[in-house]
Image: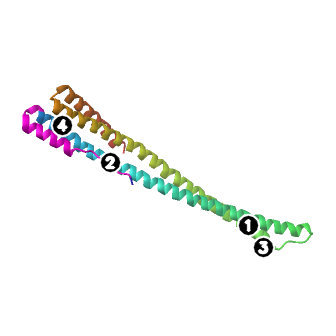
């Protein structure tokens, strides 16, 4: 099963802490704090992305199983139709030589036709279940994309936070905050859709 994107933050935190020790200051502490928060959100978003895609794969697998069962039912339906046609051919052979066919031919035709009706209902039921599972999986995959995109935005935000810490640039830190805020919004929207 695919795993969610991993967010590498260990070396980033080491770099930020080294800069704090070397130069100190509230600015670097703020960068460190926001970067750590974004890393925590990114980890949660990555877990949700992985969970939704795994659940979608389970549902797609279930849909494939149901499709196979429906196909089996349709094959069984056809087999009953062939048996009914054979019984009719036997009855027709008797009629061709102007003899009364045995009752069992007509009884078999009726029985096979009734069995076909039950088989058709079961096959259609399996197809309906298949479609429901597949549609649910498609919705989860759409949801997964929202979580995965938020992880990507968090990663950009974290990277910008590292650049801001190294260059001591407030503009880069503000860009980091904007990307992080956007990622939080996207994550929240995805969370509430699910």
**Disc 1 or 2, which lies upstream in sequence?**
2
Q: CA distance from mark 1 to mark 2?
A: 53 Å
Picture layout, residue 105 above or below residue 31: below
| Element type where label 1 sits in the image | helix
Q: Which residue is mark 3?
A: 104
**Disc 2 or 4, which lies upstream in sequence?**
4
Q: Which residue is mark 2?
A: 48
Q: CA distance from mark 2 to mark 4?
A: 21 Å
Q: CA distance from mark 3 to mark 4?
A: 83 Å
Q: Residue at x 7, y 36 (%)?
A: 22
Which quarter of the rendered picture does the N terminus lie within?
Answer: bottom left
Name the spot of residue 98 as percent of width and height, x first.
92, 69
Helix, strand or loop: magenta stretch: helix
**Disc 1 or 3, which lies upstream in sequence?**
1
Q: Is residue 18 left or right of residue 97?
A: left
Q: Which residue is mark 4?
A: 34
- Look at the image and say whether residue 10 sits in the magenta stretch: yes
What segment is highlighted magenta in the picture? 2-27
């Amino acid at each position: 099963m695919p795993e969610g994107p991993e967010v590498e933050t260990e070396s980033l935190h080491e770099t930020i802490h080294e800069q704090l020790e070397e130069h100190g200051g509230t600015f670097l502490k703020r960068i460190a704090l926001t970067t750590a928060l974004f890393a925590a959100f990114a980890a949660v978003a990555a877990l949700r992305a992985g969970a939704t895609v795994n659940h979608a794969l389970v549902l797609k697998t279930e849909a494939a199983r149901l499709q196979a069962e429906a196909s089996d039912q349709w094959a069984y339906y056809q087999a009953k139709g062939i048996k009914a046609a054979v019984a009719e051919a036997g009855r027709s052979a008797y009629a061709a030589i102007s003899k009364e066919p045995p009752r069992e031919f007509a009884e078999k035709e009726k029985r096979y036709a009734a069995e076909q009706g039950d088989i058709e209902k079961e096959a259609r039921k399996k197809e309906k279940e298949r479609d429901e599972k597949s549609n649910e999986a498609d919705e989860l995959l759409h949801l997964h994309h929202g979580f995965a995109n938020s992880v990507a935005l968090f990663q950009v935000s974290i990277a910008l936070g590292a650049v801001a810490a190294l260059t001591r640039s407030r503009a880069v830190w503000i860009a980091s905050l904007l990307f992080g805020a956007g990622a939080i919004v996207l994550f929240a929207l995805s969370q509430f859709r699910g």
